[in-house]
Amino acid sequence: MTKFRTLDDLGDVTGKVALVRVDLNLPMQDGAVTDDTRVRAAAPTILELAEKGAKVLLLAHFGRPKGERVSTQSLSMVIDAVQDVLGKEVMFVPEIAGPVVEQTVGILRAGDIAILENTRFWKGEEKNDPELAKAIAANADIYVNDAFSAAHRAHATTEGLAHVLPAYAGRSMEAELKALEKALGQPDRPVAAVVGGAKVSSKLDVLTHLVTQVDHLIIGGGMANTFLAARGVNVGKSLCEHDLAATAEKILEAADQSGCTVHLPYDVVVAKEFAANPASLRTCNVHEVAADEMILDVGPQAVEALADVLKTCRTLVWNGPLGAFETQPFDAATVALARSAAALSKEGALVSVAGGGDTVAALNHAGVADDFTYISTAGGAFLEWMEGKELPGVKALEQA
Ligand code: ADP
Ligand code: MG
């Protein structure tokens, strides 16, 4: 992996101004933050810089104001949540560059923290305007990027700043990059990937990349139906992208050429209506799905076989649930395989890295999130990484 500087490489930052890009795009309801996970993720970096005596200026985006000041999307709304997590007073600055920030920097003492306004109020942010990056950098000495979740965007505060200031990866960025490197960069083999979720179309690039990288590709969820149908299985009323049959075949061929074993379910859980514990619920072989039935989960025999596959592997990457896990009992396969992976990880036999909005929810539901080696909450950035794409925010740090 290309080297990037971390907070270990900082030197003396007493009295220096550190611009810290964090993810404060927090879920809110009625003006209150409902989940402060992202603040907690950024806290170690912020507090470490403050303890080292830097004046810390936090940069973040919130929502999609599209280059206009939108009062309902001001970052002043997250101040309380940030102060609660940090246990320190935090100042709010309604600008990101110019004299108001300059005056603030004059007032701040070493170790003080301020949040600058929503970066997306300025058009130059999403355009990655070098003039905006320069104007922001003018009030600072160093740039720390701790927002892996925004690293797939080449914006002024996620990419541009790394070119105009000495740039460092924050602690959460560093942890994420190390975990991802261990999972797909330089993994211990054999490597297994679980790819589930609703649709093949949303994860084509993920599948195409993974077949060249992993030894076992486990396909579940709605997307397994598309692969099964391509193989001539009648999937009844299941969610299925029949028009992608040729694409699915190509992915299977590419896997074959790369020596990647693809695992599709051979037993499945089906029902005639999509509801919790439906009367029509049954488990059957994939070749026995009736025309009026839907496949809603991977069956127990397949799950057992998949757990055996994981036992032979040293590394696992997981994106997408194996079934419609939000509705009982179609969470069973996801929960069972997640528990197997968690147990192996706990024993030290497996490095397990998972990510994706619904995946994180499913692993929390299975009660195993703490036992996985690493769980990424980065969403879009995690998926782009699984697609093998270079993330501009990460690349800029490596060059800096
Ligand atoms: P992530 O957010 O982790 O990337 P996705 O958004 O791709 O995951 O997929 C999650 C969704 O896939 C869930 O809402 C789940 O209900 C759905 N899903 C999984 N299996 C099936 C299935 N067999 N039929 C219909 N929907 C499914
Ligand atoms: Mg999703």
Image: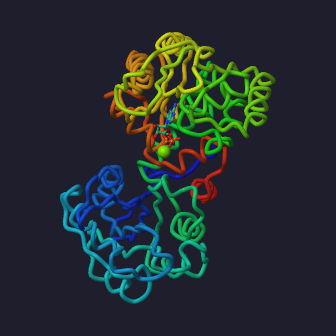
Instruction: Using the image as rendered, state which of residue 223 and residue 309 is in the foreground.
Output: 223
Looking at the picture, how far across and down is residue 339, in whole percent?
39, 20
The residue positioned farthest toward the front in the image shown: 292
Q: Say left or right for 350 vs 112.
A: right
Residue in view at x 53 percent, y 10 percent:
305
Looking at the picture, how far across and down is residue 372, in whole percent?
41, 28
Residue in view at x 62 percent, y 58 percent:
392
Quadrant containing the C terminus is bottom right
The residue positioned farthest toward the bottom in the image shown: 99
Residue in view at x 78 percent, y 22 percent:
256
Instruction: Using the image as rendered, state which of residue 130 and residue 266 is in the foreground.
Output: 266
Instruction: Using the image as rendered, state which of residue 155 and residue 200 is in the foreground.
Output: 200
Instruction: Using the image as rendered, state which of residue 72 and residue 387 is in the foreground.
Output: 72
For the image shown, how many numbered marks are present on the structure?
A: 0
51 lies above or below 383: below
269 lies above or below 107: above
Quadrant containing the N terminus is top right
Looking at the picture, how far across and down is residue 360, in whole percent?
41, 38
Residue 204 quadrant: top right
254 lies above or below 51: above
Residue 49 quadrant: bottom left
Q: In the rendered view, how is the structure colored?
A: rainbow
Q: Say left or right for 11 vs 368.
A: right
